[in-house]
Image (spheres, helix red, strand yellow):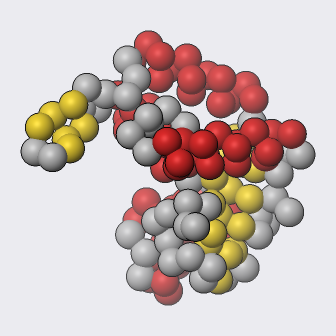
Amino acid sequence: MAALIDTNVLVYVFDPGDPRKQRIAAELLDRGLQDDSVKIPHQAIVEFVAATTRRRARGGSPRLPLLTPEAATREAEELLATFEVLYPNEALVRHALRGAAAYRLAWYDAHLWAYAEYYGLSELFSEDFEHNRLYGTVRAVNPFLT
């Protein structure tokens, strides 16, 4: 069963702030790589670089980014070389527009869902969707729920 990976899964691999989520994310990617069951949308790679290189606030005080720009670029290149990366086209964007309206999803979430729907992936691993809900033919799965 093929699944799409959301940005938050990629980011947690490098976030020591939550060791449990870090372990789950790493195991999910490792397992997906071994059985060729996970795909990554190009959007998640772009968002990954942005999310891991910006300063993060926690408890009111700014913290350093998770990765330097150089390290984030290297990791993005590794993702591109290691996983099948899916790219948008006009039909996918049209799916996203309809998904945003039909499911009342924020634009980036609708666009992410559209990758899975358009490419025929049955699951979307993300903590940003309602867990176990079916959106069209795609089931949202939050891998971090206990």
- Residue 5: x %, y % from top left: 63, 52
Which residue is more in the foreground, 99 or 8?
A: 8
Q: Name the side, left or right, on which 137 lies relative to 35.
A: left
Compared across the picture, whether 114 is left or right of 37 comes to: left
Task: Give percent across and percent down for residue 70.
Answer: 44, 13
List x then y, in percent, for residue 133.
60, 82
At 76% from the left and 69% from the top, the residue drawn is 122
Which quadrant holds residue 92? bottom right
Name the outermost residue toward the top: 70
Residue at position x 25%, y 38% from top? 56
Residue drawn 54% across the image and 42% down it: 22
Which residue lies at the image location 49% right of the left edge and 32% below the top edge? 14
**Above/below status of 126 relative to 60:** below
Q: Is residue 61 above or below residue 105?
A: above
* Quadrant (top left/top right/bottom left/bottom right) for the N terminus: bottom right
Give the quadrant of residue 91. Answer: bottom right
Q: Residue furthest right?
A: 35
Between 146 and 115, which is closer to the camera in this rendering?
Answer: 146
- Give the number of marks: 0
x and y, in percent, of residue 74 in the image: 55, 17
Residue 5 visible in the picture: yes
Q: Quadrant of the C terminus?
A: bottom right
